[in-house]
Amino acid sequence: SPCYAGHGIMFVRNDSKVFRFCRSKCHRNFNKKRNPRKVAWTKAYRKTRGKEMAVDSTFEFEKRRNRPVKYDRDLMGKTIVAMQRVQKIKDAREQRFHANRMKAASKEKKQQARVEIEKSIELLAPAVAKREEVMRNVVDSAKARIAARKKSSTKLTTANKNIQPTKDMMIEG
């Protein structure tokens, strides 16, 4: 998570390497010499295990640039618009990455669901029987409605055939 100004702990090692910790939990784990790639809740762990994107061109835009730039209102406006666009692109790529990761997991979930159903089939049998009965009732009522519509439409067509066309109808038609 981001470490905002005035928050967290900063540790400067003897070789002038600066470490910023967002909370005491991170600082404690650093002091215990824990490898962040082996601690499951860290970003480093998620990236090394392939759970988050590790390589993408949008990360280049987030890098800190230590080059002073003269303030220009137009440049700032363009920069903000570019940042928003890069964020949209990054979000879309992350969603695609997640969807690709979850494809295999959906097959696994279906397999687990099948196993669970097979284990407890005796609980589902009464519900399935009731469901089949309800479906039969729905299908029967639908067939009855369709038959009633057909009867009414055949009565109308036979009634229309019995009417003799007049001169007025022929002129209009």
Image (cartoon, grey):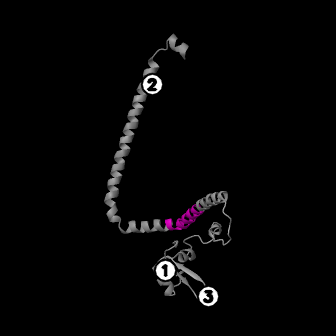
Looking at the picture, how far across and down is residue 94, in whole percent?
57, 64
Near mark 2 (Cα within 10 A), the count class, few <14, some 14-19 or many ≥20, is few
Residue that extends furthest to the bottom in the rendered view of this protein: 14
Looking at the picture, how far across and down is residue 112, in whole percent?
44, 68
**Callouts 1 and 2 close, C-beta under 8 Å:** no
Q: Which circle's residue, 3 or 2, is located before the other in the chain? A: 3
Q: Amino acid at mark 1?
A: Cys
Q: Cα distance, mark 1 to mark 2? A: 82 Å
**Callouts 1 and 3 close, C-beta under 8 Å:** no
Near mark 3 (Cα within 10 A), the count class, few <14, some 14-19 or many ≥20, is few
Looking at the rendered image, the disc whose residue lies closer to the viewer, 1 or 3, is 3
Q: Amino acid at mark 3?
A: Asp
Q: Amino acid at mark 2?
A: Thr
Q: Which residue is mark 3?
A: 15
Looking at the picture, how far across and down is residue 27, in whole percent?
49, 82
Q: Is residue 147 magenta?
A: no
Which stretch appears magenta?
90-106
Question: Where is 120 relative to 140, above or below?
Answer: below
Q: Which residue is mark 2?
A: 157
**Callouts 3 and 2 close, C-beta under 8 Å:** no
Q: Which residue is mark 1?
A: 26
Looking at the picture, how far across and down is residue 143, in whole percent?
39, 40
Left or right, 140 with respect to 44, comes to left
Residue positioned 32% across, 64% down in the render: 123
Prevailing secondary structure of the magenta residues: helix
